[in-house]
Image: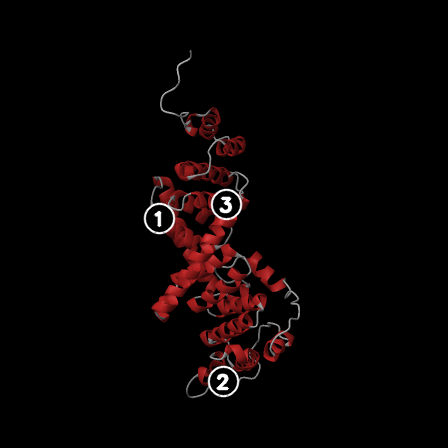
Amino acid sequence: MPRKKQGGGATKKDPTKSQVYTQMMQLLEQREWKQALPMTVRALKKMPAGVENKRLRAECYNIRAGCFAQLDDYPEMLKAAKAATVEDKTYGVAWFRAGAARSHLEQYAEAVLHLGQALPLGGLDANNESRANSCLPYSKNQLAAAKDAPASGSAPGIPDGQRKQAAAEPEPAQPATAGPVEVQRKQAAPLAFEKVEPTDLPEEPEGGWASLPAFLVMCQLSEQLATDSVKCIEQSKVALTQMPKSDKKGRAICYITQSACFGELGKQHYQHKAAVAATEEAPTLPQAWDACGNPLQILGRCLEAVYSYEMALQLGIGAAGAEAEARTRGHLQEVQLKDDRKREASNPLT
């Protein structure tokens, strides 16, 4: 009779010993980037998703990102690098690849965030560490230049393609529902977001532009969003016509207030557009980025929401109080978890 194997189970195979993995590494040594790409897919299929293979899978995705980088295909490089960070959030090289791709794609706010995560995690060889240390200040300089050039049509942290989408997408029709008279009034209100230019500038009040009557009324109404959202939006528009472009913070506060009002009215697309306008007025105001995160989270645009919340934290929303920082961190963790699940579910290689 054949003898039974002791140990009660089959021995687990080491994925790095497979022929596919060996061929992939050989192609990399030969700098055959195009030929190596399909081998990374085959290698990933031999690595079951799970804790014990998470670093190996992250390394495979990182190899894909490196191949795309050599081929100057930065959108695909970014996709592969993001997949690597999903597999292993502690893999510094993957964050470096993601940051480098973002920088090439001129998404400098995200590049700064990713590169800022890569360097503390470590694990970069001397060449990549040198690149990261040069790419990070370059991205910061480009980000600062973007802040000083509002006419360019873009603000840090939101790529131009996403900004065009926000500008173009219509407000979805909302079915009428039975309810209190006030709720029906809100739904029937013919409100839409629009950027407001200063057209009726008075002399600057002694207390500064923030002491304008319309601005003060808006602030009072913002404390009663549940009943006065429509009036609050109207007053914010009046304030924006009277505030010069030089008062960037005041104008940003008007748009942030509008964003909160549209959110209360259930108009998340307009809520997002108003928050984007706030970041354009004052790119370094953390409350503007925090305002961007909420509608994006509700609309299921998780990755953009993550960036918005991260920007708010990086720019110092904690200065507004521990409660504000804790709330933003809570939102960030919630949307990161949702985004991870979404990407893992849609990943054909898992």
| Towards the viewer: 68 or 345 | 345
Q: Which residue is mark 3?
A: 344
Residue 20 placement (x, y as % from top left): 49, 27
Res. 285 in view: no
On the question of residue 347 being in view, the answer is yes
Q: Position of residue 166 (x, y in %)?
A: 58, 62
Amino acid type assigned to the residue bearing label 3 in the image: Glu
Q: Which residue is mark 1?
A: 119
> Which of the two discs, 3 and 2, sits closer to the camera?
3
In the picture, the quarter occupied by the N terminus is: top left
> SS class of the residue under badge 1?
helix
Q: Are marks 3 and 1 in contact (CB under 8 Å)?
A: no
Marks 1 and 2 in Cβ contact (< 8 Å):
no
CA distance separating discs 3 and 1: 25 Å
Q: Which residue is at 60% across, 64% downward? A: 167
Q: Of the numbered discs in the image, which one, if any, rests on residue 217? A: 2
Tell me if residue 346 comes above or below residue 14 in the rendering: below
Dot 3: what SS? helix
3 or 1: mark nearer the eye? 3
Label 2 amino acid? Val
